[in-house]
Image: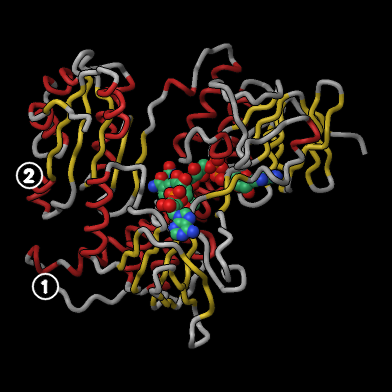
Amino acid sequence: MANETFDAIVIGAGQAGPALAAKLVTKGSKVALVEAHELGGTCVNRGCTPTKTLRKSARVAQLVRRAAEFGVEVGPVQVNFEAAMQRMHKRVDESRAGLESWLGGLDGLTIVKAHGRLAGRAGKDFIVEAGARTLQAPKLVLNTGTRAFIPPIHGLKETTHLDNDSLLKLRELPRKLVIIGGGYISLEMGQIFRRLGSKVSIIEIGPRLTSREDEDVSEAIADMLRTEGIELHLGVEIKRVLPALDGAGARVEMADGRTVEGSHLLVAVGRTPNTDDLGLQSVGLKTNKRGYLETNDRLETDVPGIWALGDINQRGAFTHTSYHDHDIVAENLAGGQRSADARNTIYAMFTDPPLAHVGLYEADAKRLVAEGRRISQAVHAMKDVSRAKEESETTGLIKLLVDEDSGHFLGATMLGMAADEVIQAIGLVMASQGSWRQVREALPVHPTVTEFLPTIIDGRKPFAAA
Ligand SMILES: Cc1cc2nc3c(=O)[nH]c(=O)nc-3n(C[C@H](O)[C@H](O)[C@H](O)COP(=O)(O)OP(=O)(O)OC[C@H]3O[C@@H](n4cnc5c(N)ncnc54)[C@H](O)[C@@H]3O)c2cc1C
Ligand SMILES: NC(=O)c1ccc[n+]([C@@H]2O[C@H](COP(=O)([O-])OP(=O)(O)OC[C@H]3O[C@@H](n4cnc5c(N)ncnc54)[C@H](O)[C@@H]3O)[C@@H](O)[C@H]2O)c1
């Protein structure tokens, strides 16, 4: 059978691939979008959408537990796990159906439901084998994402465990959930399951949770989780994992002699890129040691005509970075000069309250001060923000880093109510090269968390490099 020819082939329908494919076909290109599983990839099917939907059920349960504080009398809280999970699955199905109907209706787009693998070149074209079909095109976009990394912990392979995907397929609430890893997935899911009624223990090999955050922020997150009854084991290596003594669940033995047993074990120690079964070598494309594809700031790989978008290029591990990647490539293909280097790191971790961050951390500021830069910092507790008091949501803090010479914000971290939204005010000022003065002088809305930014800015002090 003759090869099917296209102007571009996109492998992986995560957050960048479908959006780029759609833009290309609306400009008249003929595009094949190859997806091995479900359209929407990790975010829609087993990442952001389901977890943030389930988070709401957990938040409601928690608020109802606190109802008396707000003068509302309710009976004992009973979580219907099946109903909460059904609400989540329904939202995922709706989201994926919306995507399927949008993409399915695009003229010029061929959706191929198969694993795509590169199989060399035919002249200027790249050949992609996808199930029984062979496709070829001169442009190739890789958006294959990541999957859970399962570490080589002694006994783990032989012991039943969950990852972010299988966790969302549970039909019964775990009596006790033990989580290996203390990063985003662990903390979001740990808090959600705790609030839904599970006992939760988290084992983190590093000395603190979310190790890239400032130390006081990691501590505040740990305090917040401990307050909710989550057990934390920090700075401890796991010696081995084995089935629980009663045969159901798992037992984790730690190097310091402690043991934690749970009805369920979740492994959340990071991700591994889906580049190992892509046939990259057939076109001379190499990954780095960890399997990621390196690109320039235009997201072009070392092989002209191949782009790597989303998590596999290690230029962000978020839905918004992946989606942003597609916009950069789409504009550049139309003659633009967009660069992925121009963007600031910005993200939120959706614990409740959320953690949000943009730009630099204290560790970066220390290095800059050591180089002679004049940097100031402001730290403000959420318990001193009136809106937070009115809402009885006073956990957390807000931290700002300012370059005193340019007036630009260098970074901000917020743990607290609405942090995922408030951070974007600083993010937008940073992206538009604004200074603290614009924030200081702009008229804010009362009563909001954002209205405190001018007060916080006024409280900044020289940042010490100690
Ligand atoms: C539990 C969890 C919660 C998360 N929550 C958030 C959040 O709140 N906010 C946020 O910004 N980010 C979140 N993320 C991260 C976010 O999901 C990813 O950064 C995002 O999905 C971007 O990924 P991507 O576009 O690179 O690819 P993905 O979304 O991973 O999609 C890649 C697609 O490629 C397909 N594929 C792989 N190999 C092949 C092949 N050879 N042939 C055909 N198809 C292939 C896969 O089946 C998949 O559909 C979360 C992640 C997880 C795991
Ligand atoms: N809100 C969000 O945007 C969001 C939410 C969830 C996931 N994500 C994305 O998903 C990705 C994966 O998240 P994750 O939580 O799996 O990884 P992570 O990299 O965030 O955290 C992994 C943690 O596991 C620890 N660890 C590693 N090996 C260990 C071991 N043997 N024993 C104990 N601890 C160990 C690490 O020190 C680290 O703290 C992240 O890249 C993130 O961007 C984003």
Q: Residue 130 in the image: state x and y as whole percent.
A: 78, 44
Q: How many marks?
A: 2
Q: Residue 215 in the image: state x and y as whole percent.
A: 26, 45
| Image quarter in which the C terminus is found | top left
- Counting residues from the start of the chain, the first of labels 2 and 1 encountered is 1
Position of residue 346 in the picture relative to residue 216 (left or right): right
In this rendering, the answer to whether 58 lies above or below 277 is below
Q: Residues within 10 Å of mark 2 (few under 14, many from 20)?
A: few
Is any atom of residue 90 visible in this view?
no
Judged by depth in the image, the label closer to the viewer, 2 or 1, is 2
Q: Quadrant of residue 223?
A: bottom left
Residue for badge 1: 73
Q: Nearer the viewer, residue 285 or 441?
A: 285
- Amino acid of disc 2: Asp
- Residue for point 49% across, 86% down: 245
- Residue for point 15% across, 53% down: 393
Is any atom of residue 206 visible in this view?
yes
In this rendering, the answer to whether 48 lies above or below 332 is below
Q: Residues within 10 Å of mark 1 (few under 14, many from 20)?
A: few
| Image quarter in which the N terminus is found | top right
